[in-house]
Amino acid sequence: MSETIGKHIAIYGKGGIGKSTTTSNISASLAAAGYRVIQIGCDPKSDSTTILLGGNDLPTVLDTLREQSKVRLEDISAVGFGGVLCIEAGGPVPGVGCAGRGINAAVDLLQELHLFEEYKPDFVLYDVLGDSRRGLVVGVTGYSRPNPVLLPTTGVSDMAGRQSLVIREKRLGAIGAYLGEIPPLIESFEQNSIAQRIRTFSQTAPDDIVEALRVMNRINGAGLIIHGARGCAAVQLSLSPGGAWATTNLDERDTIMGSDAVLRKAIIALYSRHHPRVIFVVATPVVAINNDDIRSVATELSDELDIPVIPVICDGFRSRIAATGYDAAKQAILKSGPLVDGEQRQEIEQTASPVSTVLNGKRVYLGLPISAAVTVVSLVHSAGGTIAGISVDHIDAGHLDDLKALQQLQPGIVLHVAGGQPFEEAGLLHRIKPELYLGTPERAVWAARAGIPAVAATTEEILKCGGLQHLLRQTHKALANPAFVRRLARDVTPPYTDAWYRRSPDWHIKLEVK
Amino acid sequence: MGLPLEASRSGCALHGALYAALAVKGVVPIIHSTSGCGIQSCLGGTTCSGWSGTGLIGGSAIPSSNISEKQVVFGGTSRLREQIKNTVKVVSGDLYVVLSGCSTEMVGDDIPAMVREAREQGFPVINIATPGFRGSVYRGYELFLKGIISQLEPAVGSPVHPIPGLINILGIVPTQDVFWEGNLDEIACMISGVPSSAWCFLRGVLMRPANLKPALASPGSISIFFR
């Protein structure tokens, strides 16, 4: 978030009560007094600046975003009465898409265009339609966190800064879809020219919420509130059945009327039963789409309960890279103060790399996160095997060294980047026909069902002390008992059509066109 | 207003519908929601829930439109159209069921229109609104049953006839009841006075008499069986 330039004023209220007229008159007066002024209309009707523009309409930011990939400030702004720079955020066609979210996307774009840094306004006025949704106002004006001024034209609303988290795609050029050799990837990361790819067919994949919960779950003495529909907390049964977790279990009414009250109730209930030293409130799609104001409730209850209550900014849709959830978790943890008791950890000396010839001449496929994959490639080589291909969940600029290491260990290696998407791997394995699959459990299961001896191991199991020995033992077992997977493949119908197995595995990966 | 739940032991309505869909042979669910919805359902169904496995197209393989911010802002119907069109090409199945999640229901995507379009092109597709905020897995199971019963005929384009003597055993939510398969087997045994005409739809392999073809594969003689 940029440091605020200029004074930001939001005029907010329901439709038809004179917001645009008031805003335009303030803008005009300020401009007449010699100030540099920007007026931003945040109303799907997009007629806030019409008065200033002498009755002319302005193309809205959202319409422009929809139509062209590269938006320039000139495309979406016009200079009106007295030199006021006019911008309309716009909104979706009524009944399609989400207005609140759309305005956020528009404000994000203005931020990317460095509007304030470039234009250096003295005043920025927002004309915000906000009937029942206080969150919308928070969303828009969070931009001006340090000095917001709010003139509610009906009712009174408290303000809180909008939290934002730069997604991995933008921060590190992360990609979640790729199939090919490694050098082009290294080149595009070095030249900072990452092409985003999307899928035209996809299967379910971990999102930021699941990954954030994985991290938060490891914090001793923390209570977790999953603020959303109850399904977003389903993963508790896998991660921490006895943990101090609660969900606000939002129902249909909460999706319309807002969810502050139930969040408050949930935090107090969790606190009174577990006395955690910190409570994290993990946001989910429902509250993200509604822009429900978590921060105000968290701040109030932090004071009331005298423990940190910290929002974890997740939403499930902004990023296609699940690791964005780690970033959200990290951001929250950094705000929660010291969480380590200062106990001394004993240094464990890493045992020497195990010696084995179990993979002599075997072609091994890996399905592991890239950091673990680099370690395991060395292990496979030292045990006499070669790598037939690697599937990783995502790649970003932080993996440049790992990519180079892989390319050096075995030049020409084929890399498949996919969070989940076992259909692509099924196609790959069908072509490559490796003699062993070594990967995370959710990936290895599909290899086993395709008749390939498979070893399932999580990253933790591999990287912990003695992990590589464990991996070799499991490998030995899998190779010694091929009948198991042979029978599996015989008795289980493959879920995919014959036509799919004939297609190129990256058939459904396309370059993203905006 | 929602009632906060501590240490919830069941997922949401979408998860209940998914558990039911994945337990029916020949049914392929298509989630129209964010990417994590399906993953949560299978993680919730592993570990403590008896490592329920993947089924035909469960686990990380559930087709899902994985909507991103673009679809939340501008609507996700075209993404859904693309997903349906490609799912029928990639995944083999007899009936495709679009299950909506919270995000697409809040955005207000016109899912029935997309499903009608696919049906007009000859694909057996139905849709059931199962946003998580509708309730727990039990509610989702119920929504799935109602949805499939009311829409099966139009989906396959031929009348649905009951099979005389057939007994549907309803009410046990697959996966949520860790012992669902055993329980259903046991109930089926107890009422096995009618075994020759009983064809159990869910996990039909175990119970189907050899002389009956899988129901959905032969639209002329369709019946609905839940086990």
Image (cartoon, coloured by chain):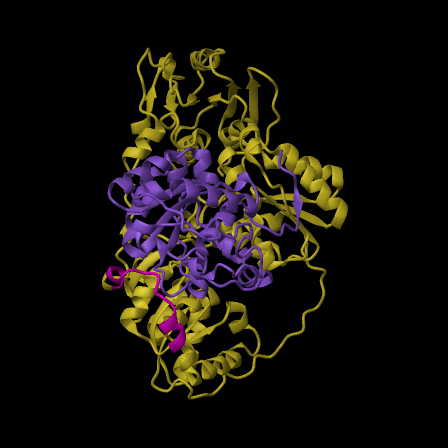
Identify whether A142 is placed above or below A151.
below
Q: What is the number of callouts on the image?
A: 0
Residue B113 point in image, percent of width and height: 33, 35
Identify whether A227 is placed above or below A392.
above
Residue name at image x 36 percent, y 68 percent: A390
Residue A409 point in image, percent of width and height: 36, 76
Which of the 4 quarters of the picture holds residue A398? bottom left
Residue A148 horizontal side relative to residue B160, left or right? right
Is B55 one of the magenta-colored residues? Answer: no
Chain coloured yellow: A
* Of residues B25 and A464, the one drawn nearer to the viewer in this rendering: B25
* Of residues B143 and A369, the one drawn nearer to the viewer in this rendering: B143
Identify whether B29 is placed above or below A502.
above
Residue B152 point in image, percent of width and height: 37, 44
Is A487 one of the magenta-colored residues? Answer: yes
Q: In what quadrant of the picture does the C terminus of chain A appear?
A: top left
Asked if one can make out residue A204 in the rendered structure from this viewpoint, the answer is yes
Residue name at image x 53 percent, y 49 percent: A328
Identify whether A383 is placed above or below B97.
below
Residue name at image x 65 percent, y 41 percent: B4
* Of residues B15 and B209, the one drawn nearer to the viewer in this rendering: B209
**Chain B hue?**
purple
Residue A381 point in image, percent of width and height: 39, 81
First to last magenta residue range: A486-501
* Of residues A272 and A463, the one drawn nearer to the viewer in this rendering: A272
Of helix, strand and loop, which mostly describes the magenta segment?
helix
Asked if one can make out residue A198 in the rendered structure from this viewpoint, the answer is no
Which of the 4 quarters of the picture holds residue A311? top right
Residue name at image x 38 percent, y 30 percent: A96
